[in-house]
Amino acid sequence: MSTIAENIAEIEEQLQGKARLIAVTKTKPTEILQETYDAGFRRFGENKVQEMTAKYEALPKDIEWHMIGHLQSNKVKYMAPYVSMVHSVDQFKLLKEINKEAKKNDRIINCLLQIFIAEEETKFGLSETEAREILESEELASLNNIKIVGLMGMASNTDDNNKVRQEFSALKNMFESFKSYERENVEMNELSMGMSGDFPIAIEEGSTFVRVGSAIFGAR
Ligand SMILES: *Cc1c(COP(=O)(O)O)cnc(C)c1O
């Protein structure tokens, strides 16, 4: 069995410097995160605010924490002091709440709009139209403590690589077309797509962040 450090090194090699790796540590105990940290890795992704916050409190403070899971507005305050990036903004209401809590902490929090690109009904995210509504809204200009820095999406969970590639490619096209909305707090720099099963395809389609869990830590 290969170690966490070996798995990370192998994935980093496949990324060829094109995208940054987020180690998805959800459900893994703090000891595993510490082991990953000791191997030199600093970028972790979690999908639950309480779990991430408990780990944040227990671990060294130079870790970059990425929130990748569906969020409830009332939990935003717990991560606002330290979160690096929120990948899962799927409502304007949530963006306003992140802005409010970021302001209290005198921070600007980087956010990605999560776009629904898969076929499954279980996946969260905005439609292209809903995302455009947020990017076009006048109220967005008044949110000085958030910055929309790109998009996130999850492809369908299927063995059909062509389908996965089409979904990633569609997201990349949307990302490029959204550059016309760039302003003070909107900049399309980051495209978060690709997980253990599909990150090599995501890289080919222009991903800048891959979120990989089971390929590093084993099955959950
Ligand atoms: C769990 C999760 C991942 C990682 O999934 P793996 O298949 O274990 O790599 C990536 N993104 C999101 C949003 C997740 O919830």
Image (cartoon, rainbow, N blue to C red):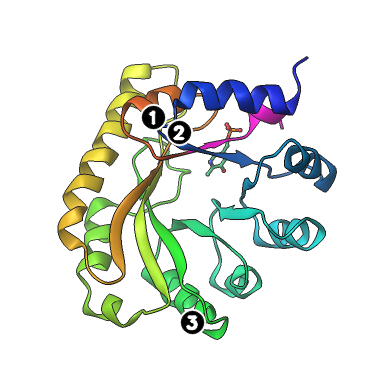
Write down the residue under mark 1.
Answer: 202
For this view, does 126 lie left or right of residue 68? left
Quadrant of the image occupied by residue 184 = bottom left
For this view, does 34 lie left or right of residue 25? right
Label disc, if present, on residue 175 of the rendered structure: none
The residue drawn where x is 21% and y is 79% is 138
Rendered-image quadrant of the C terminus: top right
Front residue of this view, candidates 40 and 53: 40
- Give the crowd class for mark 1: few <14, some 14-19, many >=20 residues within 10 Å: many
Mark 2 is on which residue type?
Answer: Gly
Mark 3 is on which residue type?
Answer: Lys
Does the CB distance between marks 1 and 3 fall below 8 Å?
no
- Determine whether 205 is above or below 75 in the image: above
- Give the crowd class for mark 3: few <14, some 14-19, many >=20 residues within 10 Å: some
Q: CA distance from mark 1 to mark 3?
A: 33 Å
- Determine whether 163 is above or below 59 in the image: above
Front residue of this view, candidates 35 and 197: 35
Q: CA distance from mark 2 to mark 1?
A: 5 Å
Write down the residue under mark 3.
Answer: 100
Is residue 10 among the parts visible in the rendering? yes
> What range is drawn magenta here?
210-220
| 127 drawn magenta | no
- Determine whether 111 is above or below 153 in the image: below
- Give the crowd class for mark 2: few <14, some 14-19, many >=20 residues within 10 Å: many
Does the CB distance between marks 2 and 1 fall below 8 Å?
yes
Q: Residue furthest top?
A: 1
Write down the residue under mark 2.
Answer: 194
In percent of width and height, residue 82 lies at: 62, 67
In percent of width and height, residue 78 lies at: 66, 72
- Determine whether 217 is above or below 23 in the image: above
